[in-house]
């Protein structure tokens, strides 16, 4: 099962002569995002 949490997507223009296009993406695990948010909350509003 893929969660598909894409955080970055970029591509170059299609090259008609060669049919090539460079595509690059980056993904992040949901738990990494949730952990980062928790850390920021504790930093901003410590209990």
Image (cartoon, rainbow, N blue to C red):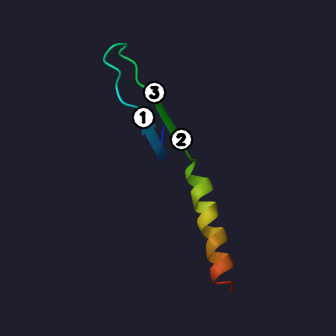
**Horizontal side, residue 14 vs residue 29: left or right:** left
Residue under label 2: 26
Which mark's residue is nearer the viewer, 2 or 1?
1
Residue under label 3: 22
Q: CA distance from mark 3 to mark 1?
A: 6 Å
Q: Residues within 10 Å of mark 2 (few under 14, many from 20)?
A: few
Whether 5 is drawn above or below 37: the answer is above
Residue under label 1: 11
Whether 5 is drawn above or below 40: the answer is above
Instruction: State the residue lying farthest toward the bottom.
Output: 47
Whether 40 is drawn above or below 14: the answer is below
3 and 1 marks in contact (CB < 8 Å):
yes
- Dot 2: element: strand
Q: Residue at x 35, y 16 (%)?
A: 19
Residue 41 % position (x, y): 61, 75
**Horizontal side, residue 4 vs residue 34: left or right:** left
Disc marking residue 34: none
2 and 1 marks in contact (CB < 8 Å):
no
Which mark's residue is nearer the viewer, 2 or 3?
3
Q: Residue at x 33, y 13 (%)?
A: 17
Q: CA distance from mark 2 to mark 1?
A: 12 Å
Q: Is residue 4 visible?
A: no
- Dot 3: element: loop
Residue 13 % position (x, y): 36, 30
Q: Image quadrant for the C terminus?
A: bottom right
Residue nearest the observer in this picture, 37 or 25: 25
């Amino acid at each position: 099962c893929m969660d598909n949490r894409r955080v970055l997507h970029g591509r170059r223009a299609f090259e008609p002569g060669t049919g090539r296009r460079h595509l690059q993406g980056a993904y992040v695990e949901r738990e990494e995002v949730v952990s980062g948010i928790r850390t920021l909350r504790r930093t901003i509003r410590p209990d």
